Image: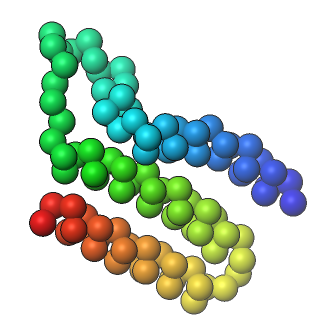
Amino acid sequence: MLDLVIIVIFLIPIYGLLIWTYFSPEESIFLGRRWMYREEPELSKEVIQYTKFTSIIAMVGIPLIIISFMLDYYFLRLVLIVGFSFIFMLGILKIFK
C-alpha cells in the first residue's frame, strides 16, 4: 500500500507536465531552449500533433503499465505492452502520413 502512495505522489507532477504539454505543445517544446533563437521559430503541424499524441499516450500508458506490474498477471502485462506499442505505432503512422 505504501508503494502505491509513493507512486501516486511522484506521478502528480508528471501528470501536470503532461497536461501542460498537451494544451500548450509549443511552450513545452521550447522549455529552456528559447534563448537559442533570435526570433520565434515556427513548428510544423506534424511536430505539434506528435507532441500532443505522445502526451496522451503517456497519460494513458503510465497507469496501465504501473497497474500491470502491480498485478502478477504476466499475460496481462504482455498484452498491455504489445497492444500499447501497436497503438503508438499506428498513431505515428497517422501523424506522418
Which quadrant of the view contains residue 10? top right
- Left or right position of 53 against 76: left
Q: Position of residue 36 (x, y in %)?
A: 21, 15
Residue visible at 70% across and 81% down in the picture: 72
Residue visible at 58% across and 45% down in the picture: 15
Q: Position of residue 20 (x, y in %)?
A: 49, 37
Nearest to the observer: residue 1 or residue 17:
17
- Left or right position of 88 against 13: left
Q: Position of residue 46 (x, y in %)?
A: 19, 50
- Left or right position of 10 against 61: right
Residue visible at 16% across and 24% down in the picture: 41
Nearest to the observer: residue 9 or residue 30:
30
Residue visible at 19% across and 46% down in the picture: 45
Image quadrant containing the N terminus: bottom right
Q: Position of residue 53 (x, y in %)?
A: 36, 56
- In this rendering, the answer to whether 60 lies above or below 87 is above
